Amino acid sequence: MSQVIAGAHVVLRPLATADRARMRDILEQPAVADRWLGSQTLDEAVAELFKRDDHTPFANEARGAIVGYIQFAEESDPDYRSASIDVFIDPGWHGRGLGTGAVRTLARHLLRERGHHRVTIDPAADNERAIRAYRRAGFRPVGVMRAYERGRDGRWHDSLLLDLLASDLD
């Protein structure tokens, strides 16, 4: 069961059915759609956000408004106990540290509260804004995953794998 996770400037709360319209509004903005949708339609992408079979979704709130979305997936095998994060922020809220805050908040929760030893995130290799935000949250580049994801243009694109280890936390 998901819980509310509070950070310094964001609150991550379980995604609710009532959030569907807001998530759709954010996803249909070109700056988000171009990075998030891949080969999915908008309707498929929105539906995927609300599935809970392989990830745990949250609405990212700041100043009483939903500013984005963040999710995590977990590897439960004790020999590989780790998690991955995926996130998007409404472009109208970019530049305020809310993506960094959400990623930092969720990563610390996964490492400290859920017992993972490692958290990964894998933005498009050319998504400099996201990479800067994740590095500010403490993530370190691991390497480029070549032809990792299919873009809206139908071509395969590289992603940069970054990770944060429990031992990296202060």
Image (tube, rainbow, N blue to C red):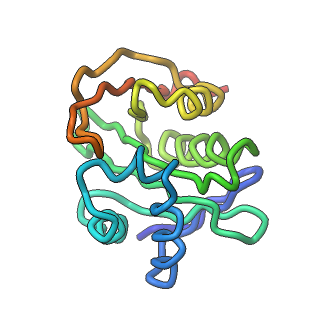
Q: Nearer the viewer, residue 111 or 161?
A: 161
Image point (37%, 41%), residue name? 83
Locate the N terminus and report the quarter of the image it occupies. bottom left
Q: Where in the figure is residue 166, as x and y percent of width and height?
A: 51, 29
Q: From this viewpoint, is residue 55 visible?
A: yes
The residue lying toward the viewer, choosing from 138 and 112, is: 138
The quadrant of the picture occupied by the C terminus is top right
Question: Would residue 88 appear left or right of 64 to someone viewing this image?
Answer: left
Which of the 4 image quarters holds residue 154?
A: top left
Residue 66 as seen in the image, left or right of residue 24: right
Q: Measured along the vertical axis of the image, is residue 61 above or below residue 31?
A: below
Q: Residue furthest bottom?
A: 18
Q: Is residue 101 left or right of residue 40?
A: right
Q: Residue at x 31, y 71 (%)?
A: 43
Q: Is residue 120 visible?
A: no
Seen at 36% across and 15% down, the residue is 143
Q: How many marks?
A: 0
Instruction: Return the residue found at the far front.
Output: 153
Residue at 27%, 41% in the rendered image? 153
Residue 95 rendering spot, x and y as whole percentages: 73, 42
Q: Is residue 46 above or below residue 81?
A: below
| Percent x, y of residue 105 | 61, 47
Q: Where does residue 61 sit, x and y in percent of width and height? A: 66, 64
